[in-house]
Amino acid sequence: MLTPQEIVQELDKYIVGQHQAKRAVAIALRNRWRRQHVDSDLKDEITPKNIIMMGPTGVGKTEIARRLAKLADAPFLKIEASKFTEVGYVGKDVESMIRDLTELSVRMTKEEEKKKVYDKAKERAEEKVLDLLLPPIERKVSPRTTGDPHEMILSLDAPEETTRTREKLREMLQAGKLNDRELTLKLEEKPRTGFPMMVEVMTHQGNQEDIEHHLKEMMGNMFPKRAKQRKLKTPEALKVLTQEEAQKMIDMDRVVELALKRVQESGIIFLDEIDKVASRGSSHGPDISREGVQRDLLPIVEGSNVSTKYGMVKTDHILFIASGAFHMTKPSDLLPELQGRFPIRVKLDNLTKDDFKRILIEPKNALIKQYCALMKTEAITLEFTQDAIDEISEISSLVNERTENIGARRLHTVMERLLDQISFDAPHMAGEKIIIDREYIRKKLHDIVEDENLSRYIL
């Protein structure tokens, strides 16, 4: 498990600045590891210290949470709090986020289990491909020595020539010499039931998933499974058969058991736009509904049991990271009980011109690296001078001040506009080297930057 310092260093590779927020999430993640090593008497009493991130859009709130989940290899769900509605109204029910997170956890665990059996599954798939390329010789049936004609055994003797041919085909298959060969596979096709819409009309959103799951299972058993024939090239056939074999080899009961434990012990939910459901104390109008959403969120964040199609999920130790711009409201406008479940508050800073410069070149996934890599696929060498980086940062900072401040996302709009013509003509410019400097940028973006009204619509 990484130390808080190491977690911050990893986050620094992708996110510029925001040191306070990185420290907060690093401590929260390390505390999870510490909890696992506490004596069992206290273990269940230690709850995660949920976090509220305050800051404008585009400063790195979501990216910090997403990268944190990746570091922890944890199920991660990002959802907008404004999507939820009070129980009894049409809309998404708050418990659905736990169901979605559980579904993600099952998928993650299933993929990991498949990787463990991949080599064995590939061997089995290879045998099936060889059977298609060279059908096995019909085996002779002979009676047992007991004299009972009903007890039969299969003669396993196959001609040596067939065995040699099969091994030769195996070598050719592994060497890729049979890649152009087309094979006909018989694949299982799940029967179509066509009942989900009926379920949606008949049931409340919260119960719909469970009922639909049981109905699918019931209908699947009622209708016979059909086989569908598909013609595929050998590599694709091998891939499909490997997946099929891996699916057969994994124990789904174990997958579900591990996934439920994983979601309960290490799940992370990123509640975006929490400020949109903050109420400023009005006793009528939309504030009533906002307060209703907060009251529905409260038991989930505090810790409760949520029914999913895989079983009950306890939310006591799921880490919740909430975020919002809080332009019109403040965290203290949330219900006191909900505030108490988010004890850690961190404010993210507005991005400066210097931050924009760093974002363009420093992170592992820096924007300039991305565009250079994209153009390289067309055999074009793209080069940005230092004064070009300064100019892009200056323009992005200026447009954010004049219009809506969308943080680092402004760099995307400026870069797209700047490289629009090159991206369009790229297929006909193979072998060229293009240098982007300050003069090139001013020529491309001068009119837009000078005209404030135009920049509102273009950038």
Image (cartoon, helix red, strand yellow):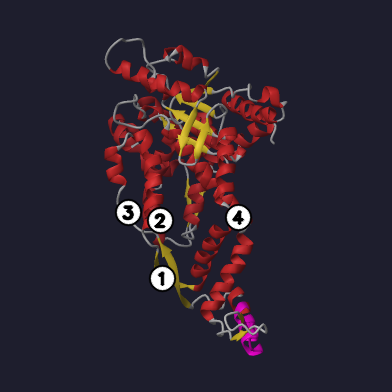
The Cα–Cα distance between marks 1 and 2, rounded to whole angstroms, is: 24 Å
Report whether 459 appears left or right of 114: left
Note whether 172 is above or below 301 in the view shown: below
> Is residue 350 at least partly visible in the picture?
no
Give the extent of the magenta segment. Answer: 154-170
User: For the N terminus, which image quadrant?
Assistant: top right
Magenta highlight: main SS: helix
User: Considering the numbered disc 4 on the image, is that residue within a helix, a strand or a loop?
Assistant: helix
Q: Which residue is mark 2?
A: 221
Report whether 216 appears left or right of 156: left
- As shown in the figure, which amino acid type bears the numbered disc 1? Arg
Name the spot of residue 362 as percent of width and height, x first: 58, 39
- As shown in the figure, which amino acid type bears the numbered disc 3? Thr
The mark nearer the N terminus, 2 or 3, is 3
Q: In front: mark 2 or mark 4? A: 2
Image disc number at residue 193: 3
The Cα–Cα distance between marks 1 and 4, rounded to whole angstroms, is: 25 Å
The Cα–Cα distance between marks 3 and 4, rounded to whole angstroms, is: 31 Å
